[in-house]
Amino acid sequence: MSLKKIRLELARTADFPEGSAGCGYEFNAPLTRLGLLDIDRWQRDKALCTVRRFWQGEKDELGGLVHRRSGWMFSYKPGEDDDEPIFRFDSHRFKVGEYVSITEHDGIERPFRVVAVTPAG
């Protein structure tokens, strides 16, 4: 169980038929040996679980990985107005090549591909 830096890049969408390495997320999260999010470790190390949303042509957004009753999400400001829910993050294995869906600020759910999982540091 260790803290990992995970990079997600936009997968194929109507606007980006080839996906985009210029759109995505980098975040730190504790993973189990199976590559699942470790909620116990997250509770101890919340301050280290940061996220950076990058999107070509836009300013990067910095925030954190949070867990609420409704599940995991990325949050950039206090409160829930800007939260980005992540579909089934609790049961997702973070391995290169896997996909995850994130509902972004605009309310649109987009697919992202795991392109890197490295030690955070």
Image (tube, rainbow, N blue to C red):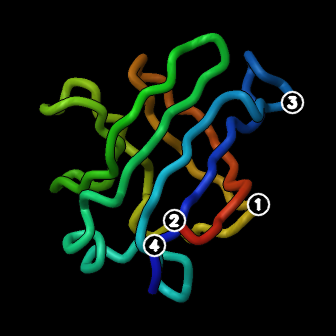
Judging depth in this view, the residue of 99 and 37 nearest the camera is 37
Q: Earlier in the sequence, mark 3 or mark 2?
A: 3
Q: Residue at x 65, y 65 (%)?
A: 117
2 or 1: mark nearer the eye: 2
Q: Are marks 4 and 2 in contact (CB under 8 Å)?
A: yes
Give the amino acid at mark 3.
Glu
4 or 3: mark nearer the eye: 4
Q: Residue at x 32, y 54 (%)?
A: 72
**SS at badge 3:** loop
Say above or below: 74 vs 93: above
Say above or below: 79 vs 16: below
Q: In the rendered view, does 70 fall on the left or right side of 58?
A: left
Q: Earlier in the sequence, mark 4 or mark 2?
A: 4
Tell me how far mark 2 sits from mark 1, CA to CA: 22 Å
Judging depth in this view, the residue of 110 and 35 nearest the camera is 35
Judging depth in this view, the residue of 101 and 47 nearest the camera is 47
For mark 3, what is the residue? 18
How crowded pointer 4 is (Cα within 10 Å; few <14, some 14-19, many 20+) is rated as many
Q: Earlier in the sequence, mark 1 or mark 4?
A: 4
Q: Which mark is residue 59?
A: none
How crowded pointer 1 is (Cα within 10 Å; few <14, some 14-19, many 20+) is rated as few
Q: Earlier in the sequence, mark 1 or mark 3?
A: 3
For mark 4, what is the residue? 3
How crowded pointer 3 is (Cα within 10 Å; few <14, some 14-19, many 20+) is rated as few
Q: Residue at x 64, y 43 (%)?
A: 112
1 or 4: mark nearer the eye: 4
Tell me how far mark 4 sits from mark 2, CA to CA: 8 Å
Q: Which mark is residue 97?
A: 1
Q: Which corner quadrant of the image does residue 16 belong to?
A: top right
For mark 2, what is the residue? 121
